[in-house]
Amino acid sequence: MGTDGEQPSPAATPIRFNRPTLMGRELELVAEAMDGGWTAAAGPFSRIAEQLLSDAHDGAAVLLCTSCTGALELAAMTLGIGPGDVVAVPSFTFPSTASAFARTGARLRFIDIDPNTLGMDADHLAEQLDHRVKAVVPVHYAGRQASIEAVCAAADRVGAQVVEDNAHGMFGAHGGKALGTFGSMSTLSFHETKNFICGEGGALVINDRSHLENAEILLHKGTDRRRFDRGQVDKYTWQLTGSSFGLSDVLAAYLVGQLEAREEILGLRGLLWHRYRDALAPRSEELGVTLPEVPDGDVSAWHMFHLLIEGEHRRDRVLAQLHSAGIGATFHYQPLHASPAGRALADRPAHCPVTDAVSAQLLRLPFHNRLSSTDADRVIGALIDALERT
Ligand SMILES: Cc1ncc(COP(=O)(O)O)c(C=O)c1O
């Protein structure tokens, strides 16, 4: 397999869950950014990265941000979400999906997930929607689309905007259309745990360009500085209560280096995903696990490899055994609807039984661009051993 570029870890060395890796010209481009003398936001490398990302999103406008959390906050501000509004989010997601909207004063409505996609359950969403819901924020869990057409149709019926939290799904697709281009906006993450990284980073993808002018001002400290930089106004002034969300051009340069390696990164991750799945699939029933699927017509972004482990507390016993074998496997999201902040910020009590069950059963295997095939096989061997013993 193509992940064979690296030396395998000696048997006793722990296998890390994630390892950020240089994939091409990142350091060369960072040096170029420093030499060029533009290190703040909206510089030459930001323009290159924004163009590459725009090309991957059907020509959408793209604004680089300091994180996906920042991009979600910018989306909430751009849409004018605030007190009296309700925003529908999956309960099974990272807290930023919800907090970015709740911090405006809006309340949250938690939606359960579909047990197959682990993204928003479109039927539960449809039941929960009303005209107070101003935005719906689906997540493409692990890089596979989550009933996105049904989610958009349900949101449309009540006039709610769809903001896709696409932290996992960049370069994935559904029915030939890129993930992140279904909603009026979407957000990306370049955090070190994601497929394409620059330490910390993110982007707001604006499909509905009527939001662009507002978003640019809000991103740039509430000023029309971007219009000034383009020569569209002769001075820049304070227009709105914005904030500072722009990514440093040094990090944008690093990101360009990663984006240039798009084919290699996606190829390596796809091979690792299939190696895990192919090894486990023939014994999944006997081992009591459910494996992820990517249906025909969908292109996954291969963000991670997860499985569900049946049996009361069995996942935790398997995790403990893997850890003692030096395998950095891990669990994932805790249900937001049952968290202290989620309970305080929900607009009504939420019932999300699939989220509760999946959260208790889900285990993620070590997954990064340079995980060798030998290490992947060690992970598989240790996992099968742990499953057989629990
Ligand atoms: C679905 C999802 N949304 C948002 C975030 C936040 O991303 P960032 O760290 O870039 O703010 C994460 C982080 O893991 C995530 O998994």
Image (cartoon, rainbow, N blue to C red):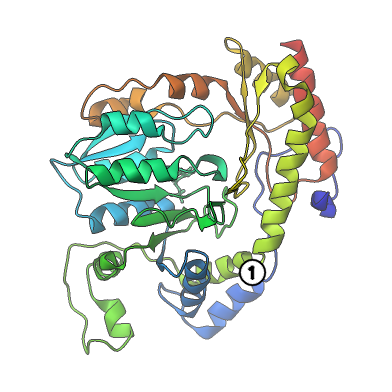
Nearer to the camera, 353 or 25: 353
Q: Position of residue 84 (x, y in %)?
A: 13, 40
Quadrant of the snapshot with the C terminus: top right
Tell me the quarter of the picture where residue 227 sits.
bottom left
Q: Is residue 167 left or right of residue 216?
A: right
Tell me the quarter of the picture where residue 41 sits.
bottom left
Q: Position of residue 17 (x, y in %)?
A: 66, 39
Q: Position of residue 282 (x, y in %)?
A: 79, 25
Nearer to the camera, 363 or 302: 302
Residue in the image at 63% along x and 47% along y: 302
Residue in the image at 33% along x and 44% along y: 153
List the residue tagged with mark 1. 260
Q: How many marks?
A: 1
Q: Is residue 368 left or right of residue 34?
A: right
Nearer to the camera, 61 or 375: 61
Q: Position of residue 218 (x, y in %)?
A: 25, 64
Q: Is mark 1 within 8 Å of ligand 1?
A: no
Q: Is residue 191 visible?
A: yes
Tell me the quarter of the picture where residue 158 sits.
top left
Specify the farthest residue to the left.
84
Residue in the image at 77% along x and 14% along y: 388
Residue 336 vertical position relative to residue 318 in the rendered view, above or below: below
